[in-house]
Image (tube, coloured by chain):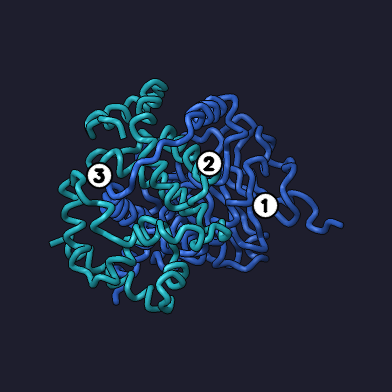
Chain colours: A blue, B cyan
Amino acid sequence: MTSDDDRDVLAAEYVLGTLDAAERAQAEALVRADASFATLVRGWEHRLNELHAGVEPVEPPPQLFERIRQRLAGAQPGGAAQVIELGEMRRRVARWRNFGTAMAALAAVLVALLVTSVMRPDLVPSRLRPAAEVAQAPAAGRLVAVLQQDAASPAFILTVDVDKRTMTVRRVAAQQPTGKSYELWLVSKQFPKPRSLGLVGQQEFTTGTALAAYQPETISDATYAVSLEPEGGSPTGEPTGAVLWGGKLIQAVPAARP
Amino acid sequence: MSMRTAAELVGLLRAVAGGDQAAFEALYAATCAKLYGVVLRILRRADLADEVMQEAYLKIWNSAGQFDPAVASPITWMVAIARNRAIDVARRKRDVSVEEAPEVLERAADIADPLAGRERSEELRRLLDCLGRLEPDQRRLMLLAYYNGLSREELATRTGRPVNTIKTWLRRSILAVRECLGS
């Protein structure tokens, strides 16, 4: 019984549909977090779904296509808000490349997924604000850092749930030069060197669980920075490119609420 | 499914990826009965199946550009999307009882019946050959799981065997099928 077999069996059972809801959520998180696992899943999808030949076609209700067409119309630019659902949100979550072994990451990934599920994109301001300004709306206990040089420049908005030790990075107008990756760092007096928190994905939102390795006080007090690194991240484990943006977390709203 | 070849479906998906709504409608017409059959069999409730179909075709519209004909055939790719959604819903809706339609389950457990007389792709032929090498009980379990989207627990209830046995059988079958297909 090898770990490779475990992964392949998990992928196959995910496709087959025999996992319970929690295991499915884990497998789905793995699909997003781990490209090699996603490849296993696609392989089993292709193999097992040949069995569709055994399913008798059934004509759906004639009005079904009209309903799809209407939802499609609502999903066009300008009308996107009402159709953004959990699945769409999850798809926005970019891959996180700095995971250790996939199985060890499972539990952590699940936490990230759950947090992402309840997190709404409007938790951080839709328009950029000066770095010192307190963000509006996030739930109690959530901290926000706006990593930005000035109000006109691109930015990363880091939202951290200190209790759950999870984070979401929102990329705002920061285009990534070809062949480069943005990497997020935690800078703390507790450590002699900056600690990598992983790469910022290409999508608007990236969630991560790298903070799970740190104490809440460390998370709250640290400075966060983004550097531009060679594709795939810093080869040395320390920032090699210029640190482009940095900032500290600020309390989004008072933690204590009646 | 109406008479469309895989190559035609590939062309339609490519057009859909470019935002062609007429192609999307043609793709829907060619595939909706197959996909509806797949999700209805898993969910056994028309209201749930309708909702899953809507979500599945929205996803097909949104991710048509990711379809890679080198990796999957158009219909297996679309079935995967629809089936995946249906199983998500089935896992959330525990009230969709297996006991509601026992006769459907019985039919699903028979490998010869659902596939009899149908044109088989080379891939399907190989898969069936490999499934055919499993112990009969284990083969039935795989098919019951695939066609009816049952969880291990539901399979255990259904077959009157402990969940651990189901888990062991599934694992053994999956690894055996993988090895058989790989050889």
Tag 2–tag 3 contact (CB < 8 Å): no
Number of the front mark, 3 or 1: 3
Quarter of the view holding residue A48? bottom left
Circle 2: element type: helix
**Res B84 seen here:** yes
**Res A43 seen here:** no
Image coords of residue B173 (percent x, y):
27, 69
Q: In 3D space, how far apart are the residues under numbered discs 2 and 1 (Cα atoms)?
A: 41 Å
Quarter of the view holding residue B139? bottom left
Q: Chain of mark 2?
A: B
The quadrant of the image that shows the C terminus of chain A is bottom right
| Label of residue A249 in the image | 1
Q: Disc 3 marks which amino acid? A: Val
Label 3 neighbour load within 10 Å: few <14, some 14-19, many 20+: few
| Label of residue B155 in the image | none
- Residue at image mark 2: B51
Q: Disc 1 marks which amino acid? A: Leu
